Amino acid sequence: MNKRAWPVVTRGLFLLWLFGVVIAYYVVHKPLALANVLAVGGAVAGLGGAGLLIALGTGIGLLLLQRVDMTPVSHLVWAAAVGLGVVSLVGLALGAVGLLRPWLLWLLTVVGLSIFGQRFWRALRAAWVDPTWRPQGQFETFLAGYCGLTMSLALVWALAPPVAWDGLVYHLTVPKLFLATGWVSHPLDLPYLGFPQLLEMLFAWGMGLVGEQAAAPIHWFYGLLAGLSLVTAGRRWLRGTAGWLAAAVLFTARSIVLLVGWPYVDIGLLLYVTLAFLSLVRFLEDDLQSRRWLALSGVLAGLALSTKYTALALLPALGLAFLSQALRARFRARDLQFAIRSLFLLCSVAVVIWSPWLLKNFLLTGNPTYPFFFGGVHWDDWRAWWYDRPGTGLLYTEPWRLFTAPWDATVWGVEGATGYSATIGPLLLGFLPFLMLVWRWLPAAQRRWLRTTLVFCGVLYGFWLWGVARTALLHQTRLLFPAFGLLALIVGAVVEGLRSLPHRPLDVEWLARAIVLGVLGLTLVATFLSTAQARPLGVLLGHESRDEFLARRLGWYYAAVEYINRELFPDAVVLFLWEPRSYHCLVNCRPDALLDRFLDATHLQGPHADAIAASWRAEGGTHVLFYRQGYEVIHDAGFDPLTDDDVATLDELRRHELQEVRSFGDAYVLYRLRE
C-alpha cells in the first residue's frame, strides 16, 4: 500500500469505529421515541400551516395597502389584518360552490405565496429593523420581555389539542362541518352556524392544510398583531413608553392571555375594532382630505362585523368619535354636511365588506342576521326568548350594581366563574381615574387624541352596560374586550403622563411604575403556575398522548364521546341533552347548543314523554347522551324555567322511552331510543 494512503486508511478505520459505537449506542439508548417525534412534528406542522396562511394573507394585504403611508411595522399589522379578511372571503366563496377542499386550499396557498411571498418577506425584513417597535431603555425592555413571555405561554396552549369550551361548541365544529363536505352549509340545529365566520373560515383553511392544530395559532397571531398595534399607536400618538405599557397592560388580563391561546375569535375582534378606530383618527388628522384612511376604517369595521355580531356597536362608536373631533372646533352647516357624507361612506364600505356573510345566511336560513331579528330555520319566538332572556339583567334584579359594574368586573370577576366570568387584572380600573390628575399636563395633541378615544370607548361601554342591564346572558366582561386595546393605551398615556408631575413631595410616577412592575410580575407567576399545573408541554413533547391529554382535561365528556365513536354504528344519530360540545364526535352527534333541546320539545309536544321520543325518532335520532351533571347544575341554579312537570316528564322519558346503554361516572348516561 502506498505510504501516503496508509494514514488515510487508518484514520478512516478509527472514524468508522467511532461512528459504529455512537450508532450502536443510540440504537439501544434512543434519545427520542417515535411518539416524541410525532408530537413535536404535529406542533411544528400546526404552527407552519398557520404561518403559511398568515404569510399569504399578509402578502395580499401588502398589495392592497401599498399606497397607504405607514411605518413598516404598522404597514405589516394593517396589511395582515386586511389580507386575512380577504383570505376568509375567498374561503367563503370556495365553500359556496363546494370547493372548500384541502387539495385546492393547498394549491391556492402555494400559488398565492409564489405571487405574494417575496413582497411579504421584504415587508417582514423592513419591519424587523423598524425602530418604532423596538424597546428603548430598561423599563420598555422589561415590558417587552413580559409581553414575550406571556405570548410564549399562550403559544404553548395554542399548539396543544383544543379543550376550550366555545372552541368545541362551534369555533372548531363549524370549520369541521364545512370541510367534511366542501360546502358552506347549515346542516344541523346549531344557531352559531349563522354567526359571522371570518376567523372560523381562516380556521377551516388552516385545518384543510394541516389539521386542527393550525386553528388556535391563527388566533394567537391576532394577539401578536394586537400587541404590535398598541406599541406602534403609542409611539405615534402618545410618545414615550405608552405603547409598550399598553401592550403589557392588555396582557395583564389573564382571560385575554387565555383567549390568545384558544381557537376563539375575540382577539380578532379586538384587533379590528382597534385598527378601525386608529384609521379613523388618521383620517381626521389629515385635515379631512384623505379618503383612503376613511375607506380603510370602513373596511376594518366591516371585517369586525364579519367576526362577531357584538361589533354592531362599532359603527355608532366610530360615528360619535368622528363627530366629537371633526366638529369640535367649528360647527358650521358645511362641516356637518361633510361629516354626514364621510360617515355615510364609512358605513357603506363596512356594510359592503360584511354583506357576503349576510347573503350566506339569507340563502341558507332565510334570515341575513340569523338567528336574530327575523327568525329562520330551527328558530321560533320561543327560542328567541330563550336565547335572549330579556328582563333578567341587573336593571331588573340588582340595579345598583350597574354603577359598580367596573369594580365588580375587576375585583370579583374570575375566569370561568359565575358573574362577569373573566379575570382582567387591576391596572385598567386602577389607572383610568388618574387621567383627571394628569390631563392638564398632557400636550394638546395627546388630549385631542384621548378625548376622541374616550368618546369611542364610552359608546362601547354604554352598549355593553345596556346588555348587562337587560339580560343575565350578556353579563360577561368578555363582550367588552373590543375596547380593551384602546383602554390600555389610555392607561399607557396616564402612566407616561405622570412623569410631568412634580416629584416632590411625592413621586407618584415612580410609585406607579413600581406598581405596574409588581402587577406584571405577579401576573406572570400566576400564568406560569397555572400552565405548569395543566401540563400542556407533555402532549407537545410526546410524553402524553393526545387521547390521554384530552381525557385528563375533558374528563367524562371525552370518555363518553370516545365510547360513542368506538362502539356505535356509523349511521347512528346521537341527540345531546344539556351538552353543547360535539367537536370530537366522529358519528352524527347533534349538540344541545342552547341547552334547550328538552324544553323546546316540551314547548312543542307538551309534557308527553312518548310524543317527545316520537319527535326525536322522526328526526332520525337513535341515541341520547344525557349530561346529568350539567342538568343538575342548571336545575339547582333555578335560572332556566324547569318546572316540576318538566322534571316529571324527563323522568318518565328516561324510564319508558330510553334504554340505558352505559353510564360514565355520575356525569353522563348514554341511552338508546326505544323502538
Image: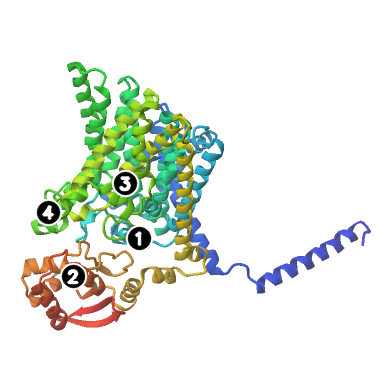
Where does the N terminus fall, quadrant-wise? Answer: bottom right
Circle number at residue 252 = none
- Mark 1 is on which residue type? Ala
Q: Which residue is mark 3?
A: 481
**Tag on residue 391?**
4
Find the distance from the CA under tag 1 to the CA under tag 2: 24 Å
Residue 197 visible in the displayed image:
no
Disc 3 from disc 4: Cα separation: 24 Å
Q: Residue at x 23, y 51 (%)?
A: 195
The structure residue drawn at horizontal position 82% and vertical position 65%, both measured from the top left corner, is 14
Please, what is the three-letter code of the amino acid marked with disc 2?
A: His
CB-based contact (under 8 Å), mark 3 and mark 4: no
Indicate whether 332 appears above or below 442. above
SS for tag 4? Answer: loop
- Quarter of the image where the C terminus is located: bottom left
For residue 635, the mark is: 2
